[in-house]
Amino acid sequence: MRPPLEHELREALVRNLELIEPGLRPVQLKEYPLPNAHGTKGSIDILARDRHQMWVVVELKRSRSSARQALHEVNKYAELLCREKNLAPDRIRAVIVAMPDDWEELLTAVSNAARDWSHDLRGYRLLLDDGGHPIAAERVQLLPRAFEPRITPIHNLFFFKTEEQRLHGWNLISKVAADLGALDLLAADFDRVAQKQWIPALFGLYLAVGRVDEARASVDLLSGYDGPEPFAAEHPAEYLALCAICNLLARSEIRGMNMEGARPGLLTNLADDPNWAIQGFRGTGAFDDTAAFEDRDLFRFLSGDDRGDGQVLYTGSASPRVASRWQGFRRESRQSLAGNPVWESLVAGWLDETSEKVGYGDIGLHIYNPCNLLQAITHGWPSRLEEFLPMVMGEAVSDEGQHSSVRGALCWNGRGMSLPEAVRLVYRDSLFLMSNMYGGTMWGRDQELLELLGLQYVLLEKIGPGQAETSAVDERRVWVRHEQGARAYSSLANPSTYAQACADIAANGEIISVTQYLNKHSREVELVAREYRAFIHVD
C-alpha cells in the first residue's frame, strides 16, 4: 500500500486535531487562504483555535528536505495572520507536524527557531496505522541551546611553598573535576619574583570554575546551597563545585598551603604587580588543552574582560534590533561598570535613548573601569597616566548615517581637599591599602577618594551627521546622574539648562578633566606617587 499524500494526511488530521492536543479545533475544514497586499500569497494547511482561544497555525510536512520550507511558511503565515486579523504576536502559535523519519532533518532547525521566535513553536510526530490513517501525535522534545563552557566569576587563590606542592594541589583539583563529571576549570600559575621575604608561600595558583553542565554532571551540585559569597547566588552549582575543591585541599597533606577568595579582575592586579609573574596556564574539561588557545585569550577568560565579568575592561558592539545579542551586550557593559554606580547609570541611560534612534544601526562601547585613582597615580605618573585612568568611549551610528559619540570623563568641580590629605584619610596605612588591593574592594575606597577630591563622573556627547570634528551644527549634551537617575542636558533643546549643567561640573567655568586636575596639582601628585610606590613596590 502506498504512503498517504500530504493532502490526504491533512484531510484526515483536520478532523482529528485532538490527537495533537486536547481542545484543538479547526477554524475551517479546508486550507485557509491568506491574501498578502505586500507580495506573496499562501494557504495555511490547518488553521485552528486552542482551548485558550489562541490561533494555531498547523503546518504539515512530508519531505525530509522541508526544514527551510516549513520554517519559512510558518513565519510567513504567522505574520500574514497577525496582519489580517490585527492580532498581537502572543495570540498566535505555530505547530509543525511531520512523520517520525522527517524529524531527523527538521529537529535542529526547528529547535533553533523555537528558541528565538516571538511566537510559541512546537513540533509533533504523526503516527499512522497500517492503512495510513493518523492514530496519534507525539510532542517532539526540541533541542536545548548548545552548552557554552565559559568561565564564571567563581574564582579562588591557592598559595604553595614549593612548585611540587602546587603540582600536587592541581592533581587533587583535577580529581575533583573528574569526580563531579568533567568539570571545566581554568587556572594560572604565578610565582613571586621579587620582595620574596614578605611572602611565606611563593607559588600561586589562580583558579576559575567554568559553567557547570548539570546534564553531564555526575552529582547534584545544587543540593544544600546556602552560600552568601559574591556571585554565588547567580552561579550556585559552580560555587558548590569550588567548595568541594577547597574542602579536599583543606583535608590534604599539603603543609603551609593558603587559600583566599578571589573575583574577576584580581588576576589583572597580580599581572600588573612587578612582584608576581604569571608562568603559564592549566585546565580541565573544555580547557584541558590550553595549547589550543593563545595565552592572551586564557588571561582574558580568567580576568573576565571578554564578557565584562572582570569589571575593568570591556569592548563590544551590537545592534538593538538583534534582540538576543543586544541583551547580552547590555549585560556585559553593565557588569564591566560594576563598582561605578554613576557611570553604570549614565551609560544605561545613554543606551536606552540611543537604541530608540539608531534603527538597524550599531552601537559600540569601549570601557576601562579600574575604579582606582591611586593605582593610576602610582603606576602612571607622570608619563603613562592615560593607560591607567578610567575611560568610557561609545559610538552609535544610525541606519540613516547619524552619529552619536559619547565620552566618559572624570571632571573636577574646583572644590575638595588636598590629594595627600584625602589619600591618607581613605587608605589609612599600607596594611589597609594592601588588604583592599588584594581583597578586590578598591572600588569602594576609590568612591570615597573621588568625593573628597571633588571629582565627578559624567558623560559628554556629540550628535551630528558624521565623525568629523565638532561643528556649530552639532548637538552637544552632558549626562549627569541625579537621585532620580541619569539625565541629559542638550545644547540645542535647552541651551540655558545645558549651560547650567556644564557650570555645575566645572571649576570656575572651565570643565577640567582628571588629567588636567592631576597636572594642575603636580607637586601633590608627585608626593603621593613616591609615598605609595614604596608601599606596593612599584619601580
Image (spheres, rainbow, N blue to C red):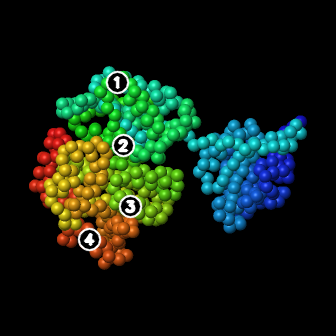
Q: Which of marks 3 and 1 is nearer the N terminus?
A: 1
Q: Residue 345 carries which label?
A: 3
Q: How crowded is mark 2: few (under 14 residues within 10 Å), some or many (20 or more)?
A: many
Q: Which mark is residue 254?
A: 1
Q: Residue 263 carries which label?
A: 2
Residue 237 image point, x, y percent: 49, 39
Q: Which amino acid does label 2 sit on?
A: Arg
Marks 2 & 3, CB-CB < 8 Å contact: no
Q: Which of marks 4 and 1 is in front?
A: 1
Q: What residue type is labelled 3?
A: Ser
| Residue 287 seen from this side | no
Q: Quadrant of the C terminus?
A: top left
Residue 42 image point, x, y percent: 74, 57
Q: Which of 89 and 441 is in front in this view?
A: 441
Please indicate whether residue 357 sits to the left or right of residue 280 in the image.
right
* Residue at position x 83%, y 46% in the image: 9
